[in-house]
Amino acid sequence: MTDHIKDQSSSARAEGSGLRVAIIGHAFMGVAHTHAWRTAPRFFPMTRTPEVALLVGRDEARTREAAARLQIAEIETDWRRAVEREDIDIVDICTPGNTHAEIALAALAAGKHVLCEKPLANSVSEAEAMTAAAQKAAVHGVRSFCGFSYRRTPALALAKRFVEEGRLGDIRHVRAQYLQDWLSDADAPLNWRLDKDKAGSGALGDIGAHSVDAAQWVCGQQIEGVSAMMHTFVESRPVAGTAEGLGGSAAAGAERGPVTVDDAAAFTARFSGGAIGVFESTRFALGRRNANRLEINGSLGSIAFDFERMNQLEYFDGRDDQAAQGFRTIQVTDAVHPYTDHWWPVGHGLGYGDLFVHQVADVVAALESDASPRPDFSDALTVQRVLHAVEASAGDGSRYTPVDQTA
Ligand code: SOE
């Protein structure tokens, strides 16, 4: 199969050729990615200018409506057509997790670069197959990327730089919370994110995966073992309602269907470099809209980040004069900070959608230089293995040690 993969290395393609992108899926992530492909060349220098050429969705009327709104010239209702087309360079997968493996494998075999939303897949075996296919395709210059977009937050990228510069010393504690609240209402309707067959898992895979990736990436350490619990607070929800959106509340008395995923996951973790971690992911933290938080304590310093204040990084330097010690708030909006020199002058700040713009800038830069992009599928496979270990550790909850040992 791979013998027929079209060579995509820079020596094999026309100098300065564009990048034609097919977006598969037109809900939240499809819109975020479309916006990013359009915006990135307006701010980041690139010789291969991306063009969103095709939008793919199963329902023709809804796909047509989305394409008109997003100003995408063509649609397809079968992703296989997008993968087969000679004029498509990148297949950008923005669909639920149960479709990732099939689409990615076909796209890689057809010689298309693949950007795939997180988590990479719904199981370790799928992620392994995707990684193996990506490694074979890479020989032909075909690249794979996974959309762990929070790596592109300037403040988190700065935190990583601080770790690499040794400012934190030996890392001891990693505290990662990803707190949302869009499911707090027990009458918020079902959507695909609550269906294990489509999403793989719930809060764990949807948002905990971001925490795992960010923690491993910032620390430069892999998670080697976990001990976990998972819980579902609301076991059935209204079937009708916001089919694609997040949150909302259905009318009283609406028919209900089962929730088959976790609402919350909590686990402790051991890292390869000796750090210990505590992770929490929930969509029931009322009042926390998108609090993706990471705190790291090392032998020399600490950092603390909360996406609800995404333009700031808290930094504590234990080498400061003790009388003046304290967390300082760095406004991560200056030209010396990651990504920010391409944006607005003198620190006007960025937002959620800009992470996806940075992701495109990094993807295009990797393609232009024939570099291996990060995170690639093998990086995403490490996250998938952690998610699997968390589920295996949590089991059905029955292994939880009772407090009353006499019972
Ligand atoms: C919903 O929880 C969601 O949209 C996630 O799916 C995204 O990955 C995260 O960035 C924001 O929240």
Image: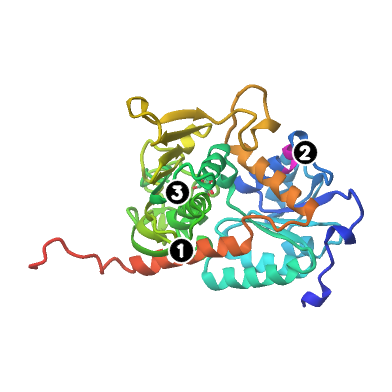
Disc number placed over residue 316 in the picture, else none:
none
Instruction: Using residue 47 as the reference point, say whether residue 55 is left or right of it.
Output: left
The C terminus - image quarter: bottom left
Q: CB of mark 1 within 8 Å of CB of mark 2?
A: no
Measured in 3D between alpha carbons, the distance from the residue under mark 3 to the one under mark 2, in whole angstroms, is 38 Å
Amino acid at circle 1: Val
Residue under label 1, please give it.
Answer: 386
Q: CB of mark 3 within 8 Å of CB of mark 2?
A: no
Amino acid at circle 2: Pro
Can you give x and y, in whole percent of width and height, for residue 276 in the image?
36, 56
Going from N to C along the chain, the mark reached first, 3 or 2, is 2
Tell me which secondary structure the magenta stretch mostly adopts. helix
Can you give x and y, in whole percent of width and height, for residue 19 in the image?
82, 50
Residue under label 2, please give it.
Answer: 41
Rendering colour mode = rainbow
Is 40 in the magenta?
A: yes
Q: Using the rendered view, name the quadrant where residue 272 is placed.
A: bottom left
**Magenta residue span:** 37-41
Residue 328 in the image: above or below residue 87? above
Alpha-carbon neighbours of circle 2 within 10 Å: few (<14), some, or many (≥20)? some
Going from N to C along the chain, the mark reached first, 1 or 2, is 2
Residue found at x 78% / y 60% = 82
Amino acid at circle 3: Pro
Can you give x and y, in whole percent of width and height, for residue 346 in the image?
63, 21
Which-is-in-front pick, marks 3 and 1?
1
